[in-house]
């Protein structure tokens, strides 16, 4: 799994340099975001992986991910069908219970709500890649809430498509990401 995470992280970081064009959303789709509590309850009732967008209020690439990728109808439809999507502010002051454990942000300063703030403990627990936190990070979790991979970086719809299929359809259970990618037939093209 470690090589899979490294490959996905590298793909996510590479994606930042590949966004030379300004892709437009493909339509009116929108991701039906849930809270972490809602997603955990839903996964317990009807197992499906979680898709967690770890963002901050001050992060420009996070806003670009919302505008360029999450608003794309293909991405929204796929995420809504195959995942329980969670939008999680990495610097929030709200406590979160995850897998029965309470996570908080002890360094949260309400006066800094719109700027950089302390890092939430849940961010460190799920979005950490080799001791490093970056925004945006999309964390893929299985239905038992185990972290499959935190993928850091801005991606457009064609770049995120294979990663969504890899985790959304359970291919991670039987093959490494690079092997999966070698046989993946992309359907989404840049606008």
Image (spheres, grey):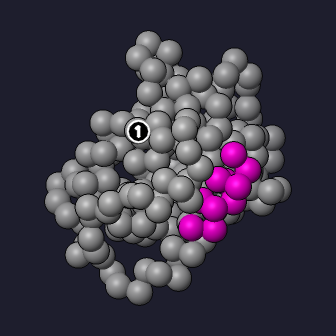
- Image spot of residue 85 (x, y percent): 43, 39
Q: Nearer the viewer, residue 178 or 33?
A: 178
| Residue 124 vertical placement versus 94 (above, below) | below
Considering every residue shown, the one lying at the far bottom of the view is 20
Report whether residue 86 is seen: no
| Residue 61 vertical placement versus 151 (above, below) | below
Residue that carries the numbered disc 1 in the rendered image? 169
Considering every residue shown, the one lying at the far left of the view is 27
Report whether residue 129 is seen: yes
Quarter of the image for the C terminus: give it: bottom left
Q: Nearer the viewer, residue 48 or 112?
A: 48
The magenta segment is 1-11
Residue at the (56%, 66%) spot, across then down:
12
Residue at the (33%, 60%) spot, across then down:
185
Residue 163 horizontal side relative to residue 11, left or right: left
Label 1 secondary element: loop
Q: Nearer the viewer, residue 11 or 174?
A: 174
- Image spot of residue 111 (x, y percent): 68, 54
Residue 132 horizontal side relative to residue 161, left or right: right
Residue at the (40%, 38%) spot, across then down:
169
- Image spot of residue 74 (x, y percent): 25, 54
Q: Which corner quadrant of the image does residue 126 belong to?
A: top right
Residue 30 horizontal side relative to residue 95, left or right: left
Q: Is residue 121 magenta?
A: no
- Image spot of residue 113 (x, y percent): 62, 54
Mark count: 1
Residue at the (62%, 41%) spot, across then down:
148
Classify 10 Å Cα crowding around label 1: few (below 14), some (14-19), many (20 and above). Answer: some
Magenta stretch: dominant secondary structure:
helix
């Amino acid at each position: 799994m470690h090589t899979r995470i490294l490959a996905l992280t590298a793909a996510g970081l590479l994606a930042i340099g590949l966004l030379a064009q300004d892709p437009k959303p493909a339509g009116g789709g929108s991701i039906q975001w849930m809270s972490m509590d809602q997603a955990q309850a839903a996964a317990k009732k009807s197992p499906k992986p979680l898709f967690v967008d770890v963002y901050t209020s001050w992060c420009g690439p996070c806003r670009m991910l919302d505008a360029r990728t999450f608003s794309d109808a293909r991405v929204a439809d796929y995420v809504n069908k195959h995942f329980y999507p969670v939008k999680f502010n990495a610097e929030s002051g709200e406590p979160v219970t995850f897998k029965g454990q309470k996570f908080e942000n002890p360094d949260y300063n309400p006066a800094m709500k719109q700027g950089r703030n302390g890092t939430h403990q849940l961010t460190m627990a799920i979005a950490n890649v080799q001791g490093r936190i970056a925004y945006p990070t999309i964390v893929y979790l299985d239905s038992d809430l185990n972290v499959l991979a935190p993928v850091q970086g801005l991606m457009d719809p064609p770049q995120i498509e294979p990663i969504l299929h890899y985790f959304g359809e359970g291919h991670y259970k039987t093959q490494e990401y690079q092997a999966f990618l070698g046989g993946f037939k992309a359907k989404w093209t840049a606008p």
